[in-house]
Image (cartoon, rainbow, N blue to C red):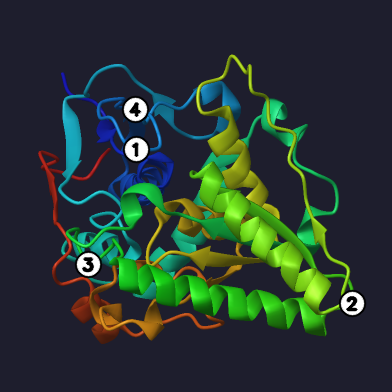
């Protein structure tokens, strides 16, 4: 007989997987189902395989499963279908009294509760990282002239965003007493290039800076160890500067850390269709949260819908 267990298959990279996990858990909470999570490892990307060793996390209040439960929920657009407004829209059809505010509060609460770093990761998070500005650089598959403009950058857009980010970095160097930065990226060559530019800024402004070194393990037995460590390090920073139009990796880090996210896509023409808007109710983007329901209804109207075979509220 079916019970109160429901499952979801999580796909793509770390940000997509865990943001969808959060939305799924919030939905299960309201439907009174036990969340069962299946990590799918299919796909090959420029940055590697989407396989993450679960020993790098402490997952709470969920079950890691190998196969679908009788009840399951499908998401047609990873990182979109389970954004706060789409979950609110789904739950509102069943419980008319639910408020958008309460769903947003659930996202903030449950993200930190269900996703924690393991001791393996905690032991490598640098001291005093909370004093740093986290710079998340994304390039490789995010920068091309034939991608989806809702989440990928044209070469021109990428140049604009990079320029604006570096302008902010220079302002931070000039204005702060002890400017400190953590720089992470899936593209080591791009990371080195930007790191050298920032070091040159330090020389040109005659201002000493600190760039935090993270103790990566090149021979780690844990798959995607460095990426998971980067994400949790970002989550500890006082602010995240996002060097790309849209990245669920640093959105996730911001949600787990309740940080302000600086995003520069408002300087490019495709800002209105950016998938980023779907997360602007639970993280501060450029110092603002957007809680207006009509705003989110319009911003997410092209996001994929949730489908499920759940036909009743759990006992």
- Disc 3 or 4, which lies upstream in sequence? 4
Residue carrying label 2:
177
Which of discs 1 and 3 lies nearer the camera? The answer is: 1
Element carrying mark 3: loop
List x then y, in percent, for residue 195: 66, 57
Which of discs 2 and 1 lies nearer the camera? The answer is: 1
**In the image, residue 18 above or below residue 281:** above
Tell me what residue is drawn at x 23 percent, y 75 percent. 273
Residue 88 found in image quarter: bottom left
Q: Residues within 10 Å of mark 1 (few under 14, many from 20)?
A: few
- Disc 1 or 3, which lies upstream in sequence? 1
In terms of depth relative to the viewer, which is nearer, 206 or 88? 206
List x then y, in percent, for residue 154: 28, 67
Q: Identify the disc placed on residue 46.
A: 1
Residue carrying label 3:
149
**Cα distance in 3D space between marks 3 and 2:** 38 Å
List x then y, in percent, for residue 255: 53, 59
Tell me what residue is drawn at x 58 percent, y 51 percent. 191
**Cα distance in 3D space between marks 2 and 1:** 38 Å
**Cα distance in 3D space between marks 4 and 1:** 20 Å
Q: Are marks 1 and 3 in contact (CB under 8 Å)?
A: no
Element carrying mark 1: loop
Which of discs 4 and 1 lies nearer the camera? The answer is: 1
Q: Identify the disc placed on residue 201.
A: none
Residue 238 in view here:
no
Q: Image check: 70 left or right of 293?
A: left
Q: Identify the disc placed on residue 39.
A: 4
Tell me what residue is drawn at x 42 percent, y 71 percent. 159
Q: Are marks 3 and 4 in contact (CB under 8 Å)?
A: no
Q: Quick one: quadrant of the C terminus?
A: top left
List x then y, in percent, for residue 54: 50, 24
């Amino acid at each position: 007989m079916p019970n109160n267990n429901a499952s979801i298959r999580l796909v793509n990279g770390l940000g997509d997987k865990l943001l969808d996990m959060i939305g799924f858990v919030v939905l299960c909470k309201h439907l009174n189902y036990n969340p069962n999570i299946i990590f799918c490892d299919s796909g090959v990307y420029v940055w590697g395989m989407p396989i993450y060793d679960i020993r790098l996390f402490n997952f709470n209040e969920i079950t890691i499963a190998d196969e679908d439960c009788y009840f399951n929920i499908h998401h047609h657009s990873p990182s979109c279908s389970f954004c706060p407004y789409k979950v609110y829209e789904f739950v509102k059809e069943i419980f008319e009294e639910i408020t958008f505010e309460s769903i947003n509060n659930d996202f903030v609460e449950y993200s930190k509760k269900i996703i924690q770093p393991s001791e393996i990761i905690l032991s490598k998070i640098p001291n005093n990282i909370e004093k740093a500005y986290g710079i998340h650089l994304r390039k490789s598959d995010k920068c091309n002239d034939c991608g989806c403009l809702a989440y990928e950058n044209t070469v021109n857009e990428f140049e604009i965003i990079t320029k604006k980010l570096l302008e902010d970095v220079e302002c931070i160097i000039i204005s702060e007493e002890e400017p400190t930065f953590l720089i992470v990226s899936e593209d080591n060559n791009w990371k080195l290039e930007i790191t050298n530019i920032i070091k040159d800024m330090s020389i040109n402004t005659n201002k000493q800076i600190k760039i935090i070194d993270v103790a990566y393990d090149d021979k780690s037995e844990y798959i995607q160890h460095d990426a998971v460590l980067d994400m949790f390090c970002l989550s500890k920073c006082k602010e995240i500067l996002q060097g790309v139009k849209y990245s669920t990796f640093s959105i996730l880090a911001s949600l787990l850390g309740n940080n302000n996210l600086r995003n520069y896509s408002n300087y490019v023409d495709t800002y209105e269709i950016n998938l980023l808007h779907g997360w602007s109710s639970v993280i501060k983007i450029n110092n603002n949260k957007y809680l207006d329901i009509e705003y989110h209804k319009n911003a997410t109207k092209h996001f994929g819908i949730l489908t499920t075979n759940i036909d009743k509220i759990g006992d």
